[in-house]
Image (spheres, grey):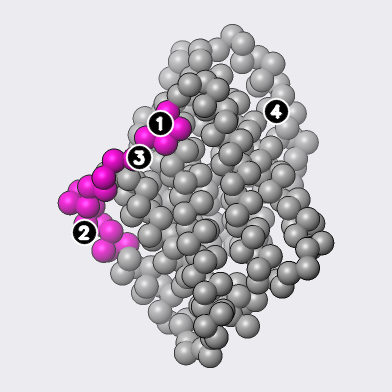
């Protein structure tokens, strides 16, 4: 098997394992990862790194899922627990970051000053599309100042950490295995599949995958995570205001 084929195989495997994980076939995911880790001694370093990244990612996702039980034991309101839960996205981010650090590789390459000139029209177009999608569902709501602060905090945390993980870390790792376009495609499909556990329909999953492609293109062309983070924050904010996370606006 030639190296490009190995990279393509691992990229496909990532999306399949993500689907199995979100559908709660955890044994399939972790047995597959165990087999990969046993056999990775015969592979080149970049493939070994990605296999370990997959292991760290899914382990982090599993731990993240069980943080809900921990939060239920704390004497805080449901709103505060939701905000704190998003902070726990730092678990998969931290584990994956540690693996990449041990391999002495670049964790996030998109640290340059944002090249807005490369994406200005696309960014505005994306922003207008997002607003047009949510605008029909927007309604004037009597939301307290405290609730607004919680909503903004949740949106900032969610938007920043999601993009740090998906467009920052995972996209970069896939770029080391396959072409840039394929990396954007695979990470976007996996990103869309991450919403399976929320019970969303197939159409919503596809929409989130398309969104992932758009955010990935913005990230690559601007050489920065800032545009994707801003749009992700806007999407989260609009989702809350339109009642998709009703507990935060009650």
Residue linked to disc 3: 110
Viewer-closest of 226 and 11: 226
State yes or no: discs 1 and 2 in contact (Cβ < 8 Å): no
Of the numbered discs 4 and 2, the one sitting upstream in the chain is 4
Question: Which disc is residue 230 wearing?
Answer: none
Residue pointed to by mark 2: 121
Q: Which residue is mark 4?
A: 32
Residue 121 within the magenta-colored segment of the rendering? yes
- Residue 69 spot, x, y in % from top left: 79, 57
Q: Is residue 240 magenta?
A: no
Q: Residues within 10 Å of mark 4 (few under 14, many from 20)?
A: some
Residue in the image at 54% along x and 65% along y: 154
Indicate which label's residue lies in the foreground, 3 or 4: 3
| Sooner in the amino-acid sequence: mark 2 or mark 3 | 3
The residues tagged by marks 4 and 2 sit, at their Cα atoms, a distance apart of 43 Å
Find numbered disc 2 in the image and state the secondary structure of the residue it sits on: helix
Q: Which residue is mark 1?
A: 175
Q: Which residues are magenta?
A: 106-126
- Disc 4 from disc 1: Cα separation: 22 Å
Task: For mark 4, give the secondary structure.
Answer: helix
Q: Earlier in the sequence, mark 1 or mark 2?
A: 2
Q: Secondary structure at mark 1?
A: helix
Query: Residue 156: horizontal and vertical position, in percent?
Result: 48, 62
Mark 3 or mark 4, which has the lower sequence index? Answer: 4
């Amino acid at each position: 098997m030639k190296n490009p084929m190995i990279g393509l195989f691992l990229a496909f495997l990532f999306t399949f394992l993500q689907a199995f994980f979100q559908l709660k076939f955890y044994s399939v995911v972790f047995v597959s990862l165990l087999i990969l880790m046993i056999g990775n001694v015969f592979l080149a370093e970049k493939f070994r790194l990605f296999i370990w990244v997959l292991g760290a990612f899914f382990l982090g996702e599993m731990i993240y899922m069980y943080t809900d039980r921990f939060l239920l034991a704390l004497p805080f309101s449901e709103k505060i627990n939701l905000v704190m839960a998003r902070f726990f996205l730092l678990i998969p981010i931290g584990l994956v970051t540690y693996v990449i650090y041990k391999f002495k590789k670049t964790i996030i390459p998109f640290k340059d000053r944002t090249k807005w000139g490369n994406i200005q029209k696309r960014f505005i177009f994306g922003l207008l599309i997002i607003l047009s999608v949510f605008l029909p569902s927007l309604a004037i709501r009597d939301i307290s100042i405290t609730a607004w602060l919680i909503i903004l905090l949740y949106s900032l945390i969610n938007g920043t950490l999601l993009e740090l993980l998906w467009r920052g870390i995972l996209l970069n790792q896939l770029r080391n295995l396959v072409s840039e376009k394929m990396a954007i495609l695979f990470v976007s499909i996996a990103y869309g599949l991450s919403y399976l556990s929320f019970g969303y329909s197939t159409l919503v999953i596809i929409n989130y995958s398309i969104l992932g492609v758009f955010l990935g293109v913005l990230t690559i062309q601007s050489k920065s995570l800032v545009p994707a983070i801003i749009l992700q924050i806007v999407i989260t904010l609009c989702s809350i205001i339109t009642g998709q996370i009703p507990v935060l606006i009650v």
